[in-house]
Amino acid sequence: MHSFGKPNLLNRRLYRCTIGALAAVFFASAAYAESSVQVPVSMVQLKTVGNGFEMDGVVQPVKQSTVSAQASGRMVSLTVKAGDTVRAGQLLATIDDRETQTGVQRSRAQSAQAQAELRNAQANFDRTRDLLTKGFISAAAMDTAETQLKSAQAGREQATAGEKQSGLTQGFTRVTAPFDALVLQTLAETGDLAFPGKPLLTLYAPAPLRAVVQVPVSRSAMVLPSTVIEVQVRAADGSLQWSRPSQTTHLSTADAVSQTVEWRLELSSVAAKGLLPGQQIRVRFAAGQAQRLVIPTAAVLRRGELTAVYVASGKGFALKAIRLGAEHTGQGVEVLAGLTDTDRVALDPVRAGLTGAQPAGQTAQ
């Protein structure tokens, strides 16, 4: 009996340990079930929303000009800087005009010489005509005098044109503003060498302004004559609102590299208030209404290039990649691919990614 007592004692101890372990596992499982993360969910809904799309555009001045030099020489002065306001005809820069002054003097001398030659040819023509009427010379001599007179007249006209041309060239050494504008940037400094075609500065008129947006060719077919085009601007109270442009135009060709069509949307003075050239602006193309799958914006999880949602399943949640469309204020965001109207998505994707997360109202299995 004594030889069998030790194994029986060992078995009883193993039995008690096993029972304790099972009890611990049971109570741990119960505690886990009670402490599982409950995440609210929402059904993917098929809603009637505005049919269209939104894109980012850029504010541009309708009137902008790059002022370039039209004469050669050193920059003697630059009288404005970026941010200055200028008036039409205001002096912006001066180019060394010593060479052009020499050209003006030469042209004036040539004009005076041509005028003297014309007077001499006119006097010779008058004498020859008198002699012809008296029969002292032949008709051939008269023809020669007439030809000399016409040549002198042509010479004078050529000299006069040269004098005007030299005057214009002299005027090109004084660069003036073509219209009332603001100086956007200066592209040259005093002492730089100027030559015809070299940009000196850029000007733009502060009004009117327009929004320019590059629409992909793939979406151009969605823009119909009935499409409502709006830009998002800030109202007087600081809130954002949608405003229609006063005029819309688009280029008839697509960019060969980006495969986009440029749309130009002119803004009214009220809509353009507070906007600056180069500022980004939101543009909306709305073409009626259509049925679209919509989910709450809060359900979307973005991690780098991944856009996904947590979809409720029998075991909790499953991460599913989706492709989104336009966002509709107050209704949610469109889902173009990845979901159906029978799916339920987690409204808190961060908590839905935790271990043991369950849809609200559902217990762990």
Image (spheres, grey):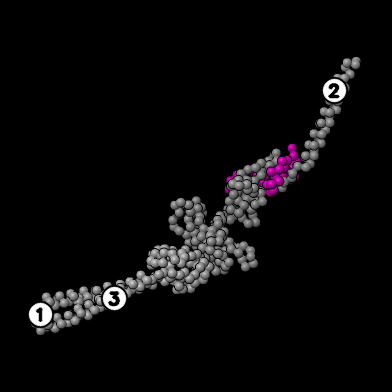
Circle 2 — which element?
helix
Q: Which residue is mark 1?
A: 137
Circle 3 — which element?
helix
Q: Nearer the viewer, mark 1 or mark 3?
A: 3
Vertical placement of 359 versus 67: above or below?
A: above
Q: Which mark is residue 11?
A: 2
Vertical placement of 13 versus 271: above or below?
A: above
Q: At which x and y percent is residue 179?
A: 46, 71
The span picked out in magenta is 336-365
Nearer-the-camera pick, 280 or 53: 280
Residue at image position (39%, 67%) is 73
- Circles 1, 3 touching at the beta carbon (< 8 Å): no
Q: Which mark is residue 109?
A: 3
The amino acid at mark 2 is: Asn
The amino acid at mark 3 is: Ala
- Looking at the image, residue 139 sits to the left or right of residue 230; the answer is left
Q: At which x and y percent is residue 289?
A: 57, 55
Between the residue at mark 1 and the residue at mark 2, the CA separation in whole angstroms equals 160 Å
Residue 4 occupies quadrant: top right
Q: Quadrant of the C terminus?
A: top right
